[in-house]
Amino acid sequence: MLKKDILKAISEGNQHNGFLKEIQKEIITSPKSIVILDDDPTGTQTVYDLPIVTSWNTSVLEEEIQKNPIFFILTNSRSLQVEEANNLAVLLGKKLKELAKKYNKELIVVSRGDSTLRGHYPNEVDALAKGLGIKNATHILAPAFFEGGRFTFNDVHYVKEENNFIPANKTPFAKDNTFGYKNANLKDWIVEKYTGNIDKTSIDSLSLQFLRTQSTEKIIERIESLEKSHIVINATSYTDLEAVALAILKSSAPFLLRTSASFVNAITGIAAKACLVKEEILTHQKIGGSLIVIGSYVPKTTVQLAFLKQHSNAIFLELNVSTIKNDTLFKNHVKELSQKINHHLKENKDVVFYTSRTIIKGETKAESLAIVNKVSNGVITIIKQLNIKPKYIVAKGGITSSDVATKGLNVQRAHVLGQVLKGVPVWKLGNETKFPNMPYIIFPGNVGDSEALYQLTKLLT
């Protein structure tokens, strides 16, 4: 019955025309600078023709806020410890506030987080509010991400797996060593994230019926209510997210937005676009070997890797994380892998190198995150030691894709071309990078079916 109800809600929502034209008109008549702080690079998985910067130097941010009404800042804060994530959010909030004042810009800042509810919440959003100088603003939580099969229905957040809708707390993502959780009902999830230090009655939610039957003015009235500190957005279609986005754009009240990638399209008025074809991606280097880097260890990625092994002629190399606690062994292992990868790329062979599927846990959440980062440092070292330019690089996993880009390839600014598969963005790298103009494909760990990674390589062959 639940499945039937959700499918019906999706179908009915998709039958609406939505509010895209009204949003686009509002953005033109009431210009705003929309800045998306992305806690890993996967947040660009629904947009196109937009810049993303990886530096928060004032000069860099100043140039973007003058030239581009919409841009991304990659914070990679999901890989940071709590205090580091908070400090970065405060810093960015302060800088954006100062620049908005300097150039007389009306500012909307979106904290883009994971659609499977992992990440620093609420501390990161509260820290951002502190930097922006916003007090007592309402948190709006909208994690629905349709391209990846994430829907919020009757306040419960679901992950679509094949033909089933699974409450998010019943998925492997809820068992994350650092950001695990017990509740899929988003009101309960918020209480859980505040460790009980919030009254559930202060949390409101906007139902599908309300969003689909009420005027924009009524939605504005509801979200501006000072009686509620947090508002959960139910959404099974873009119509629902656009209804909220239009209300936010028309409202004069400040909001703290914690959303998925789909909401970014709604608030920016970016229409859906077909996935990129091979000719749009491989515009410079059309021959040579490719490189796929797999750091994500979620079960979905492991299944995709297994399928790729069965059907691909690529060279597969494993970064064995069992040596992670012995610095000398791990360093020598990384050096050996690096030499092998360069050798195979020189022979124009496709290479897949992946971290062991065994998960090494720490005794605390902070220690587990530290181990993840140490593994990532090994991956970065290998990327830094590449001396053959691949035809393209695919990075699988959020932290992996960020570290490969910023620390391995020295990406400071990139252009989002679009998506090669639903939810899988393609960046064109800037001239400052290790491999200028190379396509860089960010494949989230939690996106796609078992064949998706193989289908990507097949498309670009």
Image (cartoon, helix red, strand yellow):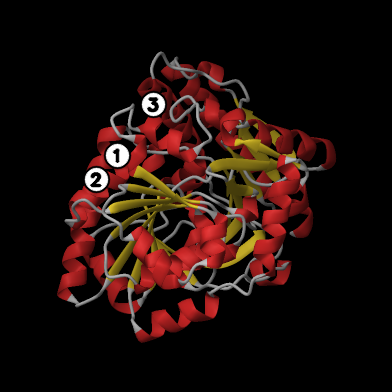
434 and 324: which is toward the camera: 324
In what element is the residue under mark 1? helix
| Marks 1 and 2 close (CB-CB < 8 Å) | yes
Specify the amino acid type for callout 1: Asn
Q: In this view, does 294 lie to the left or right of 304?
A: left
How far apart are the alpha carbons under marks 3 and 1? 19 Å
- Residue occupied by mark 1: 123
Tell me: residue 153, above or below residue 241.
Answer: above
- Residue occupied by mark 2: 127
How far apart are the alpha carbons under marks 1 and 2? 6 Å
In what element is the residue under mark 3? helix
Q: Which residue is drawn at 44% across and 18% down?
A: 328
Q: Is residue 49 left or right of residue 77?
A: right
- Residue occupied by mark 3: 370
Q: In the rendering, at what x and y percent does residue 356 appear? A: 61, 25
Q: Residues within 10 Å of mark 1 (few under 14, many from 20)?
A: some
In what element is the residue under mark 2? helix
